[in-house]
Each structure stands twice: as C-alpha cells, then as structure tokens.
Image (cartoon, rainbow, N blue to C red):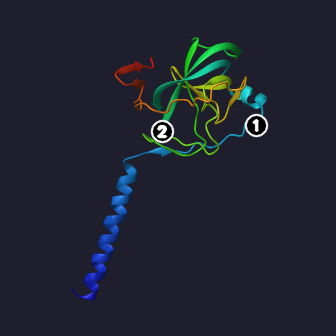
Amino acid sequence: MTRGNGRAAAVIALVVAVSGGVTGCALQSGSCRDPIALETSEDRLDAAVLVVDADVRATGRTVAVDGSYRLLTATVTDEVKGRAPSRALDVFSPSDQCTTNGQPVEYLEGDVLARNGRYRLYLTEERRGLWRLVVPGAAEPLEPVASSEPVASSGPVASSGSLESPGTDVPLGG
C-alpha cells in the first residue's frame, strides 16, 4: 500500500467512525430546559397554574417526558390557587439536568419529592392528566417527613399518552 492509500484509508475510517457516532446519537433524543429562577414562594405562586397542599406518594410507575421520571400521586388536601381537576393528581418532579428520552433522569441537588410526605406543590399541566412542578424544586414540605422511605423508582416507562405498570396500562385521557 502506498503512503497516499494509507492516508485515504485513515480518512475513510475516521468518516465511518464519526458517522457511526452521529447515527447512534440520532437514535436517542433529549432536551435541556432553560432554568427559570423562582426563588421565593411568591414567585412560584405567580408562575404556577395550580398550587395545592397534598399527600405525595410513589406509584411504582414512571412516565416518559424527555426522560424517564418517577410518577407520583398527589392526594389534594387543600387548594391554594386554581382548582384541581380531581382529588388525586399524577405528578412528576422535573429534573434540573439535561435529559435523554428513555433514560432515567438525574437531579443535581436531589429530587425535592424523593420522599413520601405532605407538600405544597406549585404545578403546571404537562399534558392532559399529568402535572409537573412549575420548575425543578417547586415544592415545600409541610411537615417533617415522618418516613425515611424513599419514593419508589422502579417500573416500566410510559409511552406517549399512557402510564404503565406491570400488567396494567392506564391511559392519561384525552
């Protein structure tokens, strides 16, 4: 092989390696939400569509929204702003990190709803029947968390418009 052919082979190998890497990236998508600083309760109250006091519990399921999030049930005990569409809301806590579809999300400073308990939740509707904190961390504990039991993090990922748990498909409505 001449020197020119070796160089051409190296360039071809590099192109194949780079295009293979780009193709691998194209199979997964993700997002990075721009952080909005809502430092005070008043700021969060203004930004939220719905503010409730609720008992928050793990469901053992996940929901796919630009990543795999733990799905929680918030049983509303008081409405502070807006009107809850039902007593039990499906809720997730958005990540403060970039996310990748199908992959579990991560939290830089931990998930504010990592433990079951009573919280004031500052919410916005992600899609019909699914609520999220208006910004990462937009929840306030209402009492010391009595249980050290973390919120469950297992369960299959829901796909576009449905929530799944082993053997059960629960539609979001619509």
- In this rendering, the answer to whether 108 lies above or below 117 is below
Label 1 packing within 10 angstroms: few (<14), some (14-19), many (20+)? few
User: Rounded to the nearest whole Å, what is the CA distance between mark 1 and mark 2?
Assistant: 25 Å
- Which residue: 72% across, 40% down? 37
Q: Nearer the viewer, residue 118 or 95?
A: 118
Relative to residue 2, is residue 118 drawn left or right?
A: right
Q: Nearer the viewer, residue 70 or 117?
A: 117
Q: Position of residue 46 (x, y in %)?
A: 74, 27
Q: Nearer the viewer, residue 48 or 39?
A: 39
The amino acid type found where label 1 is placed reads Glu
Task: Confirm or deny contact between disc 1 and disc 2 (CB under 8 A).
Answer: no
Identify the residue at the far bottom of this view: 2
- Which residue: 68% across, 16% down? 82
Element marked by disc 2: loop
Relative to residue 61, is residue 87 drawn left or right?
A: right
Relative to residue 121, is residue 11 drawn left or right?
A: left
- In this rendering, the answer to whether 156 lies above or below 35 is above
Number of numbered discs overlaid on the protein picture = 2
Residue marked by disc 2: 67
**Which disc number belongs to residue 77?**
none
Quadrant in which residue 2 is drawn:
bottom left
- In this rendering, the answer to whether 14 lies above or below 114 is below
Image quarter hosting the N terminus: bottom left
Q: Position of residue 130 (x, y in %)?
A: 52, 23
Q: Earlier in the sequence, mark 1 or mark 2?
A: 1
The amino acid type found where label 2 is placed reads Gly
Image quarter hosting the C terminus: top left
Q: Position of residue 10 (x, y in %)?
A: 31, 76
Q: Position of residue 142 (x, y in %)?
A: 72, 23
Residue marked by disc 1: 39
Quadrant in which residue 11 is drawn:
bottom left
- Which residue: 27% across, 76% down? 9
